[in-house]
Image (tube, helix red, strand yellow):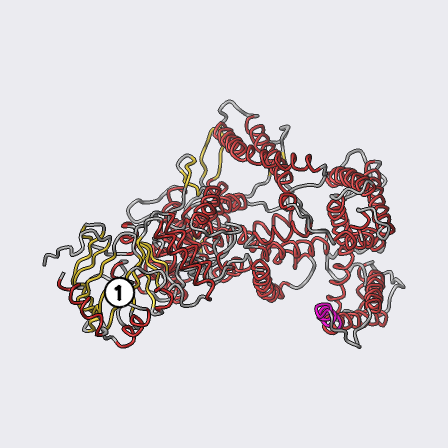
Amino acid sequence: MMQAYLENKNEGRNIGLLVTLLMFGFTLIGALVALMVLLWWMPLGEYENILLDDFNAYEVIVIIAGVIYAVCCARTTFGLLRREQSSLRWSQWMFFIALIIGGAILLSVIIPVGLKFALLLGQNIDLRTQITEEVGGLVPTVLSIGEGLISISVLVLVLIALLALFVFIIPPLESLRRMEGIRLIVAPPRRLIQAILLVFALGIICVLIAGIYAVPLHLDKTKIRIAEDHRILAGLIFFLPAFFGYRQVRQMREESDELRRAVALTPGKFIRAELAKSPSAGAIIGFIAIFMTFTMATDLFLEPSSIASYLSNVATKGVIAIGVTYLMISGEFDLSVGSVLGVAALSFMLFMTEGAPVLGVLDPIPAALLAIFVAMVLGAVNGVLLITTRIPSFIVTLGTLLAYRAITLVAIAGGRILRYRDYHAEFPVFVISNIVFVALAVIGLALVAFTAYRVLPVLLQGAGRAWSIRRENGDFGTSGAIIRFAVFLVILLILLAIVLWLVAVFGYHIGGELVEVGYFDLFNGRVSYIGSEGDFFHLEIPRDANVRLAILWWFIFVAIFHIILTSTSFGNSIFAAGGNEGAARAQGVNVDRVKVQNFVIVAGLTGIAAIYETARNPGVDPLKGQGWELEVIAMTVIGGALLTGGYGSVVGSLLGALIFGMLQTGLVLVGIESRLFSGTVGVIIIAAVVLNTFVRGAQRN
Amino acid sequence: MEYKQKNPDALVDMIDIHKYFGSVQVLRGIDFHVDRQEIVGLLGDNGAGKSTLIKVLTGFHTLTRGQIFFDGDGVDIASPHDARELGIETVHQDLALVPLMSIARNFWLGQEPTYKVGPFHFMDKKLMASESIHALADVGIHIRDPEETVGTMSGGERQSIAIGRAVYFGKKLLILDEPTSALSVGETQKVLDYTIAAKEKGMSVIFITHNIRHVYEVADRFTIIERGHKLGDFYKSEVTENEVADMIVTGQIPERLRLYEEVAVGD
């Protein structure tokens, strides 16, 4: 239809004008939202006092985004009126964005209400007493237990109906569509099915509204967000027209010109291409889904303290997960990381307190290096055992898991905890000139500049080519090359700003001022502020936010090991060793060496993690690290690594670890019992692997 | 014991090759040679010893007795790596490529081009992509996208890429181990075409199979092995397809050909 409209044919006229009108409507909405925020009619975020003398970050983002969206929509409306071919693609993007905004607003109602229903079902709460306690003696007349039960039963019925819908109606419909030509007498007319769907949608909305009022707002001790009914309206205003519009413009004629097709980028193609490129597609989807769920479910999830909490909780495990990913890609498996962590932590602590065999009591940094070396030796033992005996790594590392654990059990007799404070009165510190930090920041600046120098011209060239192609075609459609260039430029500017900021923070005191740094703080200290009090660049981190330096180290390790894996020949040989050992050998890859190296890498990273853990809490007990191996493997598997080898990514392990951490923190925040944590993780692992397999299957086709 | 090269011009000359596994004598004094730019069909029934002979040549097995000459020099091939260094490339039925890796990465596996940034070496991915397209196009293999994973391709396409890779890296000897046994007719024909392309680029080829139909078309010469012994060497002009097939099955040289054989031995 839209194609007909663009070709100025009569039949597509009504639909085309309707879509144009919708697009104009979204122009107005975008402009209106920006204007409302700009004039303080619609304050966003939380204000402690209503002195609206400044915009906060949310508002600035919404104003800028609203204006950009309105401008783009206006241009698209213009394009539709002039019947430009590429306006179809632009309409897709604009409707797609509106769909996401509307969906997100609706989800911010659906998820809290759904969670509250789920909690009610699970807890069998006496609603009246809950409310009474909450408001301190006043008995509100909102609800009786009976009403609560009714709304629950309505929900159950709706869920059953939905299930029935998916099981019985949608699949036959699909198969009917595929069997074109065969006319079945009982084929349900399309209109009927659409009507049923509409009724169900309305039903869900009714239940949502009922849920908002029927379920007590402050349920038990949960911190689930209070759902507001006007969000349903706001969400639908975005969602329904966008849904209609997107369906109309989705059918695009395949452009004949190969070149133009390469430049053309629609939301569907873009997402599919991005997911197909990434081994961690399942993890990306899972990450977004879980992040959205918790963000929608509770306001607390985006608090700095929560973010810091889930990052800090998984940072050390995430470091190990990088190594485990390497090993898993090369087709092997390590169960002994928990025990290696114990031994490394023990050695680190022993070297600083009782002293190393020949060297005596060591300073923290030599002690750390030696402890990491000890861990690497243990890893090398794993690897050498594997390649000499040729028994599966599962068995080898199961054995060493138990054997290495014996080291800590024997060394620390009687289950005692070896504490740093029992030997030294103070934690170790060193004194360093401020200039060192400035120098580090300058090196960072140089790295950013170098990256820009390498990458920017290439991207610019590509963008320029895409631009000229569009010019020739008289087309205003967007293209991947230009977007890539823009995204890279933005990232570069952000990096530059961060580095310049660091230079400014530390350079403020230039003059060789001496700074006292705790060794343990350097490894995994708690970051409470950057820049001293009273500086222009002073940044205070909230008291309850447990930001640990290990988070920074973790991200740095992820970046380094990601580059090694994807951009060096060593990385290539890891993939080959796991993907097809015989082929790798035939091509002259020394598979045995690669595998031993990977065992050493895992153990080395585990040693580093052990240093972080010990620095965070300077004491070692004999069971330190027990049970970590399975958690780390869970993170890796969620991140998309194949247990059979040959596939996976470091970024995936990062996402896997984040999913793990978000679940740990988020479940507590929404008030779901922490006893359910391991059960949830179990479900997530299986779901993630199914998703990964599914996405990989889709990539094949 | 000193061995002398019997065919001084040959690329590969294997003389008096013995290989025992414990008390099992798999190869009992085989002489085998490959001339330059020649396609040799190495034939024999299952268990005749053709795989063992090739594994000796490619360094997977070490010799019990005998001597290998490569390019006129006596060589000691102790590992697959040694064979690779000499320029011997083997394309196995299922061991050729890594299915989960892209074409470009497979193509360059083990010898990735790198560029240096300070002390670090990075793979030159752009060069890998563009060169693999050109190199494969040179032998007539046209691929859509070098980033495509090999797992999505058919058996014939994989074999072709492995052959193209061997040609590109200037190998002297290409060993095709049962390359066509799982391929369709059309794909088999393609692999045979690429084999001829490899020969035209200056390579010698050993084509191992027990299916004479596939190899008869492209091979210049046939070496037939029977229970650890060499039954004989026959140029294509000397024998018919059916005679070769009979020899593989019966292990007997037909009356008509005995004369050629004696002449060859007396040489």
The amino acid type found where label 1 is placed reads Glu
Task: Say if residue A276 shows up in the picture.
Answer: yes
Residue displayed at 25% across by 57% down: B34
Q: Nearer the viewer, residue B112 or A12?
A: A12
- Our reading of the magenta stretch's main secondary structure is helix
Against A176, is A438 above or below? above
Against B264, is A76 above or below? above
On the image, the x and y values in percent for residue B168 come to 38, 48
Which quarter of the figure is the N terminus of chain B placed in? bottom left
On the image, the x and y values in percent for residue A125 come to 77, 69
Tell me which chain the residue with mark 1 is part of: B
Q: Determine if the magenta segment contains residue A567.
A: no
Residue A374 relative to residue A651: left or right: left
User: In this figure, which residue is indicated by the disc labeled 1?
Assistant: B238
Numbered label tally: 1
Residue displayed at 53% across by 43% down: A552
- Kind of element beneath mark 1: loop
Q: Nearer the viewer, residue A118 or A194?
A: A194
Residue A189 relative to residue A651: left or right: right
On the image, the x and y values in percent for residue A333 come to 43, 61
